[in-house]
Amino acid sequence: MEKNTAEKKSFGARFAAGLKEAWRKFLVSIKRRPQMIPLVALVITFLVYSLNLMHISDTTAKIQGPGMGLAGFATMLFSMLSMMCCMNAFPYRKKTNVPMLVLMFIMLGVIIFSDVYYLNCIYAAINRPDNPIVVTVATSYIAYAEWYLRIHIGMLVASIALVVLLPVYSKLIRKIKTSVDVQDNGSMDAIDISGEG
């Protein structure tokens, strides 16, 4: 019984130590490349949009507003290109590539404009005096499209903020201690290598 308890404690201690080491390695990688934070934010933003593309496509087919399909296409295209620009704007251990950074901001601005334009097409279709689109259970995808587009815009704004504030929080991240303390370095007895005894 005592052996099982000791083994459980030993496993728990090893598991906790493993988690602590994994967290330390994660922090070390973030300290080396803090530009990964806004890039990950852009990737998550793109995934949120692309995973809900079905609602947006159904809404486009139902409303058929002018430029709605083009707005959706522009959002997908510039989302992927903006991630590429983000990777090229912050090369590892080199100065920021300003033209790529500017191009990325332009693309993110185009994405936000496309989302706002798409939302306005939805509002215009719902509120038009002649034959307005009624959102029912059968057309609930329109409400979902509007909801996810709002979330997408919010996440884009957050991603832009992460890029702008990168110099600030990267300095704070570098101050986090990630070195490993090696204990009993000076208390080791001299090793006898004479072969006696």
Image (cartoon, rainbow, N blue to C red):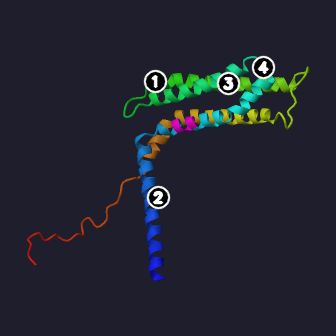
Residue 114 horizontal side relative to residue 181, left or right: right
What are the residue bounds of the magenta stretch?
Answer: 39-43
What amino acid type should be assigned to the residue bearing mark 3? Gly
**The C terminus lies in quadrant:** bottom left
Q: Is residue 105 visible?
A: yes
Q: Earlier in the sequence, mark 1 or mark 3?
A: 3
Q: Earlier in the sequence, mark 2 or mark 4?
A: 2
Q: Secondary structure at mark 2?
A: helix
Q: Which mark is residue 19?
A: 2
Name the residue beneath numbered marker 3: 72
Front residue of this view, candidates 177 and 60: 60
Q: Position of residue 72 (x, y in %)?
A: 67, 24
- Local packing at callout 3 (Cα closer than 10 Å; few below 14, some 14-19, many 20+) is many
CB under 8 Å between discs 2 and 1: no
What amino acid type should be assigned to the residue bearing mark 4? Gly
Q: CA distance from mark 3 to mark 2?
A: 41 Å
Q: CA distance from mark 2 to mark 4?
A: 52 Å
Name the residue beneath numbered marker 1: 98
CB under 8 Å between discs 2 and 4: no
Q: Earlier in the sequence, mark 4 or mark 1?
A: 4
**In the image, residue 3 above or below residue 186:** below
Front residue of this view, candidates 158 and 167: 158
**In the image, residue 139 above or below residue 121:** below
Q: Earlier in the sequence, mark 2 or mark 1?
A: 2
Name the residue beneath numbered marker 4: 65
The residue positioned 73% from the left and 21% from the top of the image is 68
Q: Secondary structure at mark 3?
A: helix
Q: Is 155 within the magenta? A: no
Q: Earlier in the sequence, mark 3 or mark 4?
A: 4
What amino acid type should be assigned to the residue bearing mark 2? Leu
